[in-house]
Image (spheres, grey):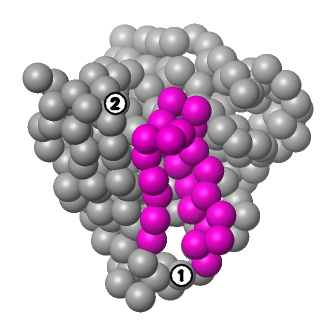
Amino acid sequence: EVQLVESGGGLVQPGGSLRLSCAASGFTFSSYWMHWVRQAPGKGLVWVSRINSDVSSTSYADSVKGRFTISRDNAKNTLHLQMNSLRAEDTAVYYCARGVTVGSHFFDYWGQGTLVTVSS
Amino acid sequence: DIQMTQSPSSVSASVGDRVTIICRASQGISSWLAWYQQKPGKAPKFLIYAASSLQSGVPSRFSGSGSGTDFTLTISSLQPEDFATYYCQQANSFPLTFGGGTKVEIK
């Protein structure tokens, strides 16, 4: 069974940093692109970042470019999102999601999400 | 960036009703479109990909159609478990973008 379990969320002050993790199991993690998608309270879904299977390529939404860094450890089946210079507008539930197939940008499995709250 | 516009933003319907949700892309995306269902406090669930292909395990009352800029999600006979918010998503180019969502409510 495919499982994605996020962790690392919490309350952080504006300008602070947080590192999210997503532990994957039930599939060959190293074969899939992975993504982060966020959802502000009461709002819609927003794609944040993606990383390809062999860690050679990444992409970011303009709103987080230069502040967030996506990474993965294929040996540990873990995806990360390092978030720096956090702003109030980064407050959201952050989901990790699996890309359907190599190069495909649909999301077939999602984690349960981890809440990040940026507030003083 | 490709803008995705869903309509309506909400719909009230009864069990057994046919419900259609529209998603329009600001530029052509071929068939690079997916639909997701989200219930309160839960992660989105993958329903349809490539505009019209049903994900494994999704009931056949769900169907998708369209290509280019105009797409629809149809629920042929609404069931109690279908009351949720539905999102379209374009997978044609980065940044990947979602529609604003359509909330299907009980009438």
Left or right of B42? Residue B86 is right
Label 2 Cα crowd, 10 Å radius (few <14 / some 14-19 / many 20+): many
State which region is magenta.
A48-72
Counting from the top left corner in percent of width and height, residue B41 is at 24, 37
Q: Quadrant of residue B62?
A: top right
User: SS for tag 2?
Assistant: helix
Q: Quadrant of residue A101?
A: bottom right
Front residue of A105/A11: it is A11
User: SS for tag 1?
Assistant: helix
Chain under callout 2: A
What is the tally of numbered marks visible in this picture?
Answer: 2
Q: Say which quadrant the N terminus of chain A sits in.
A: bottom left
Residue position for label 1? A30
User: Can residue B48 be seen here?
Assistant: no
Q: Amino acid under label 2?
A: Asp
Front residue of B39/A84: it is A84
Q: Nearer the viewer, mark 2 or mark 1?
A: 2
Counting from the top left corner in percent of width and height, residue B103 is at 43, 20
Residue B49 - label: none
Q: Residue furthest bottom?
A: A75
Left or right of B7? Residue A95 is left
Magenta span includes A64: yes
Chain under callout 1: A
Magenta span includes B50: no
Residue position for label 2? A90
Front residue of B102/B60: it is B102
Where A66 falls versus A88 (above or below)?
below
Where A108 falls versus B96 (above or below)?
below
Counting from the top left corner in percent of width and height, residue A18 is at 24, 48
Left or right of A63? Residue A115 is left
Q: Amino acid under label 1?
A: Ser
